[in-house]
Amino acid sequence: MRIGFIGLGNMGAPMARNLAAAGHDVTGFDVTGVALEGVASAASAGEAAAGRDAVITMLPDGAILARVYEEITATGERGAIFLDCSTVDVGAARTASARATAAGLRPLDAPVSGGVGGATAGTLTFMVGGDGAAFEAARPLFEVMGSRAVHCGGAGAGQAAKICNNMILGVSMIGVCEAFALADKLGLDRHALFDVVSTSSGSCWSVNAYCPAPGVGPTSPADKDYQPGFAADLMLKDLRLSQQAAAEVDADTPLGAAAAELYRRFVEEEDGSGRDFSAMLPRLAGRGRGAD
Ligand code: NAD
């Protein structure tokens, strides 16, 4: 396929490289002017989108997505798949989708999980919102960039699935870190806690696959001094999106709100920025109940 790829950052660059390596004709654009081997460079987003069968965006947020869509929906070829893989708010995804549909394009919101490692290895999971036929047309792209794509429903459903999943993840990671910090103070060995919890009703991905305690369980960012992995800053972004969505639809999410506030403090007022989101464990373990 002739593919335009806009946003060649930590995630977009390896995704574009994988598409080119699979034999697709890829033209990329990023405001930084970055050039990738095997990927042709366009001078603007509009140029990257013109005359392509599919246009993929991997951008920081909804405001930037809106600006880029204003430009590329004007140059995109009628019938082209417009696949937005950025994580943005549900409202921005639906607005972008409506704009693309009005221009005769076939939009899909398709945020990912799997991080930079998954983007590089081509093992991302895509959560996809939009038309079913467009989803099928985009399947060859999902197969190169990822190992799983789930069609979640209409426009915005992919973003909704992503923020619901990550709200669970943020809450569960805090819960796991609280348990390890409490175990320390109770004199309970961390390995013993892992052995019990990972095979009991407290088991979850945050313990079993991504244990926040260094040297315990499978290798995780905790074993590399909490280098991300999945940065606390990105967890904060996703928790904020979950709370924005919850406010818009009047959903009661008290633990999601508490998790968002805890990660906000960790990232904006403490030493969490640039660290993996599981570094919540040393933060909690180093405090007592009286700390604010
Ligand atoms: P990044 O900041 O590394 O990349 C974004 C890129 O977009 C940058 O290179 C930036 O220069 C470019 N950009 C900004 N404005 C642009 C414009 N107007 N036109 C063209 N390019 C523009 O971010 P990332 O880590 O690659 O993440 C991208 C998206 O994926 C985000 O929405 C993020 O939330 C989501 N995501 C990231 C991860 C992760 O682990 N990094 C995991 C899942 C989802």
Image (cartoon, grey):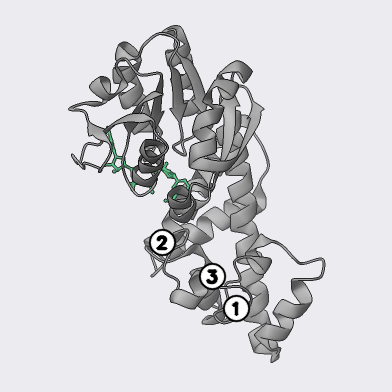
Q: Which residue extends farthest bottom?
A: 187
Does residue 129 lie above or below 288 as drawn?
above
Q: Quadrant of residue 155?
A: top right
In front: 117, or 183?
117
Residue 7 at x, y percent in the picture? 32, 37
Q: Which residue extends farthest right?
A: 201
Question: Image point 43% across, 53% down: which residue?
Answer: 116
Element under label 3? loop
Residue 107 at x, y percent in the picture? 49, 20
Mark 2 residue type: Val
Does residue 99 lie above or below 225 as drawn?
above
Query: Whereabouts is ligand 1, in terms of quadrant?
Result: top left
Mark 3 residue type: Ser
* Mark linked to residue 267: 2
User: Which residue is labeled 3 in the image?
Assistant: 220
Q: Quadrant of residue 153?
A: top right
Q: Does the beta carbon at disc 2 come under 8 Å from ligand 1?
A: no
Mark 1 residue type: Arg
